[in-house]
Image (tube, rainbow, N blue to C red):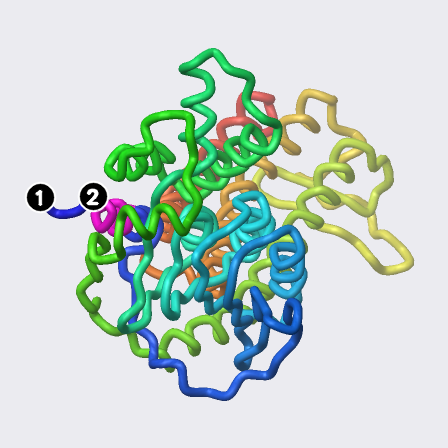
Amino acid sequence: PVSLIAAVTSALIAVASPQATPAAPASPATTEMSAGPARPQWLLSREGPRVVFRGAFSPASGAALALALSDESVEGLVIDSGGGDENAALDAAEVILARRLPVTVRGQCTSACANAIFAAGATRTIERAGFVSFHHSSPVIEANYQTLNEAVPDEIARGARRLRALYAARGADPGILACAAAQIGLSDIQTQSSIELEQRYPMAVVVALPPPVPLEPDAFVRIRRLSRPLEWLFTLLFVLGAALLAIAVIAVLTYVGTRLQVRPGGMQIYIEATVPPVPPGWTTVGALPWIQKIALALSASVMMIPALAVLWGLRRLFRLYGSGVVLTQENARCMGGIALWLMAYAVAPTLGHVLVTLAGFD
């Protein structure tokens, strides 16, 4: 049978991103940022807008990577890691998740790297000759302790809790980690070092993924670049619309002067120094009974809220595009929400008219 390790890898890729795109081989020169000891166990550098991490995860390397990824100028991560401390890897993975950063595997990404870093990526790319391998994880080890009615060590419980939260945020089932552990025989409470695992389960069991359909890099960059101004535009329009609605509702409910006048189907505001007499058929808002004031405020809200929801949905959609999330289920859900609010916007004037009519303002 086909190795479940490959199946697990494919499942994670399919859950939150419809394709994993191949990237060019490592050719650009990198600028070193920091490293471990004289014989480094990890190396952190920059390659244009992307952070490059090589080596094992420890509290020090995980904290350094998390700090580097928090920089607003960083647009992605390139990684080559055999794993290490899972909580340290989760420190960086949570930043990747929060900033919706893409992850590229250059070489290997196994153990804690696969469980946390690879799973957190907004998009996941495996370069040619690279591989991803899952095996034991804190949720699996925690479950084994619980099966034997043993106390779960704090670090294991903390890692399990954080890893489950990460998978829930990505829409993935952490149960696939248990499947991977069962496939390689980690069914008891004893954990094994990475060296023991490599000796017992050589990397020949990891099946390389077939090369996916390439995505035009320039087009992808253009989508991200053009989406950011549109996100700001719809944010501004939403704020202005919400402010106007709030002012209108407060004015209708509290203003008692003669500058704000209404009639069925219309409203006028006088800003000149002298206000002329109220025209026939018009009345000041302050003269209306409370039931009609409330009806007018509700009518304005019913008509404006769908429009504001559409603007917010467009802002969210272009925010996804700007973060590199394109043609995913999340985009489809966002578009579906916009469509529903557009339908609500079409019927809102009728509902608003019904409200003011029932209040006797006709």
Secondary element at tag 2: helix
Residue under numbered circle 1: 1
What is the x, y in percent for residue 291? 68, 20
Q: Residue at x 66, y 68 (%)?
A: 37
Tell me if mark 1 has few (under 14), some (14-19) or many (20+) residues whose alpha carbon lies within 10 angstroms of its own: few
- Drawn side of residue 41 relative to residue 223, left or right: right
Q: Quadrant of residue 271?
A: bottom right
Q: Residue at x 37, y 68 (%)?
A: 107
Majority SS type along the magenta span = helix
Whether residue 328 is visible here, answered yes or no, is no
Q: Is residue 179 above or below residue 53?
A: above
Q: Which quadrant, please, contains the C terminus?
A: top right
What is the x, y in percent for residue 130? 31, 67
Asked whether residue 27 is drawn in magenta, I would say: no
Q: Residue at x 21, y 47 (%)?
A: 7
Three-letter residue code for mark 1: Pro
Residue under numbered circle 2: 4
Q: Is residue 262 above or below residue 244?
A: above
Secondary element at tag 1: loop
- Asked if the residue under mark 2 is in contact with the one under mark 1, i.e. CB atoms within 8 Å, the reply is yes
- Near-viewer residue (215 or 189): 189
- Near-viewer residue (328 or 46): 46
Three-letter residue code for mark 2: Leu
Whether residue 209 is visible here, answered yes or no, is yes
Q: Is residue 237 above or below residue 2?
A: below
Query: Magenta segment, which residues?
Result: 4-11
Asked whether residue 5 is drawn in magenta, I would say: yes
Tell me if mark 2 has few (under 14), some (14-19) or many (20+) residues whose alpha carbon lies within 10 angstroms of its own: many
What is the x, y in percent for residue 151? 55, 17
- Near-viewer residue (102 or 204): 204
